[in-house]
Amino acid sequence: MAGGNSRSSRVSDWVGFICFGTFALITLSKMPAVGILLVPTLAFESFVAVSFLIREPLRAAVRSPHARVAAYGGTFLLLVFLQIARRFYPHWLAPTELGAFRTMGALLWIVGSIWAAYSVWYLRSAFSIEPEARCLITSGPYRFARHPLYTGYLAQYVGMWLFFPTLPFGVVLFGWFLLMADRIRHEERVLGDAFPEYAEYRRRVGALGSVRLRRPARA
């Protein structure tokens, strides 16, 4: 039975590597037209692809349908929406005419993409799409947030919406945010079960970026 689980795990590792490696190649093919703005996205997809092949063995996981919907929906919902909008409903991605919104959106978009790539690089040995526990990462960006990758996603997607502030995009973004919140809940549960020290880490560090400081003891 253990051998069967190991083989299944290796198959899923290679499937993940091939999928995100393909995303990276598609992004690379678009770079001559778009330029250096796609570098953070290319780095992110490349880091994720490699992470599937170098990650630590699985220690615990949540395999419920609910958890999987949150995980895969949170990963691919916005990507699918953007592809559908570009191909069939380009007015869903109509850029704003407000220069301040465009500037702020572009900055958040780029900064969020860079932060997401930085976070997944630190997470590489523990990366997974479904809620799983492999090893506990608390260094790098994980000193400031328990889920810095989602902080990067949030900044990136909000920046995109400020650039393309349409109602359909806003509705899908809100749905993605609900999936992300549910995804965090499942991941917190499996990490807490697998690592007793996670409770102290969770007490000190906020989920998306606020570091929790201890109140000074009263005299």
Image (tube, grey):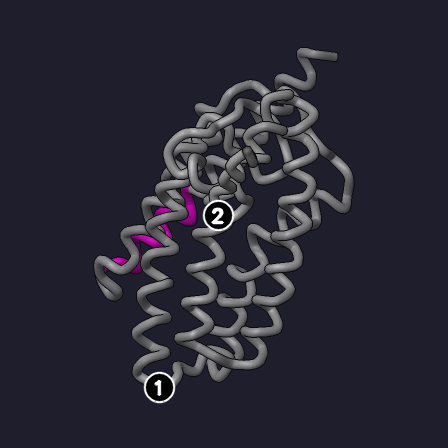
Q: Is residue 1 above or below residue 124?
A: above
Query: In this rendering, is residue 5 above or below 42?
Result: above
The answer to which image quadrant residue 160 occupies is bottom left
Task: Evaluate if marks 1 and 2 touch, with contact meaning CB atoms under 8 Å apart.
Answer: no
> Where does label 1 land, which residue?
98
User: In the rendered image, which quarter contains the C terminus?
Assistant: top right
SS assignment for the magenta stretch, majority: helix
As drawn, 26 above or below 81: above
Residue 27 in the magenta stretch? The answer is yes
Give the amino acid at mark 1. Answer: Leu
* Residue 152 counted in the magenta span: no
**Magenta residues, start to end:** 21-31
Q: Residue at coordinates 76% horizontally, 46% vertically from top-left? A: 66
Point out the tag, 1 or 2, that comes first from the N-terminus. 1
Query: How far is disc 1 from disc 2 in space, using C-alphas?
Result: 30 Å
The residue that disc 2 covers is 210
Type of the residue with mark 2:
Ser
Q: Quadrant of residue 174?
A: bottom right
28 or 92: nearer the viewer:
92
Quadrant that contains the N terminus: top right
Residue placed furthest toward the front: 219
Percent x, y for residue 114?
Answer: 33, 50
| Residue 100 found in image quarter | bottom left
Residue 196 placement (x, y as % from top left) = 64, 21
Q: Residue at x 42, y 49 (%)?
A: 23
